[in-house]
Amino acid sequence: MAMIRAARTIFLVLIVSAAPLAAGAGDLEDFADAVERAELQYRMALRTLESSGRKETAAEVRLFREALQDVIERLDSHRPAQLEGDSSYAAAMMQIDMAIVGALIVIDIGSRESARAALEPIGEKLAKLRERVDQQQ
């Protein structure tokens, strides 16, 4: 059973990390795609929390953090014109990243309930970010 879960997780990670961006898409679409991939990885981390142990959950949360780093990179290097001059996106990224670090600490030392409590607010922040990006499109 553990091997099936591991294979499924690896498969989903490959899908998330290899999800192609639309050819010729603009910077905003690329940014929105990166946010969507981060959101997918977040959901995978939550599923892993419910079905696996601390090590597996921490690994999925680290993959989520990497996906968020891709969002941050796109914001830094290819900032969509629609977001130019809006520093609130950078602030949101920093808040989410700090919350991920906190969640990783809780996962390492806390219970499943504590880990869930640490991860859920991140999902809310990510959903708000996604809404804002969708409104720009």
Image (tube, helix red, strand yellow):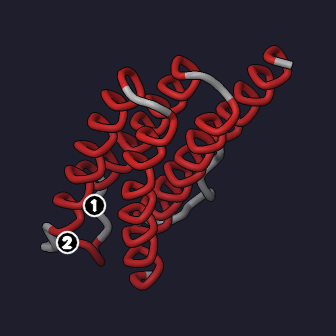
Asked if residue 93 lies left or right of residue 16, the reply is left
Tag on residue 104?
Answer: none
Question: Looking at the image, which residue sits at the far bottom?
Answer: 135
Q: How many numbered marks appear?
A: 2
Closer to the camera, 120 or 60? Answer: 120
Amino acid type at circle 1 is Arg
Q: Secondary structure at mark 2?
A: loop
Q: Please rate how many residues cluster around mark 1, counting C-alpha atoms within 10 Å: few if below 14, some from 14 to 19, many from 20.
A: some
* Residue 6 drawn above or below residue 9: above
Q: Position of residue 52 (x, y in %)?
A: 66, 26
Instruction: Give the residue at x 29% y 51%.
Output: 96
Q: What residue is disc 2 on? A: 84
* Of pointers 1 and 2, the one earlier in the residue sequence: 1
Image quadrant assignment for residue 87: bottom left
Instruction: Give the residue at x 58% y 44%.
Output: 46
Instruction: Give the residue at x 39% y 72%.
Output: 128
Label 1 to label 2, Cα distance in Å? 7 Å
Q: Please rate how many residues cluster around mark 2, counting C-alpha atoms within 10 Å: few if below 14, some from 14 to 19, many from 20.
A: few
Q: Are marks 1 and 2 in contact (CB under 8 Å)?
A: yes
Q: Secondary structure at mark 1?
A: loop
Asked if residue 82 lies left or right of residue 64, the reply is left
Image quadrant assignment for residue 127: bottom left
Asked if residue 100 lies left or right of residue 91, the reply is right
Q: Where the N terminus falls, by quadrant?
A: top right
Q: What residue is disc 1 on? A: 79
Amino acid type at circle 2 is Glu
Instruction: Give the residue at x 74% y 20%.
Output: 6
* Residue 54 drawn above or below residue 128: above
Asked if residue 47 lies left or right of residue 122, the reply is right
Closer to the camera, 123 or 109? Answer: 109
Q: Position of residue 125 (x, y in %)?
A: 36, 63
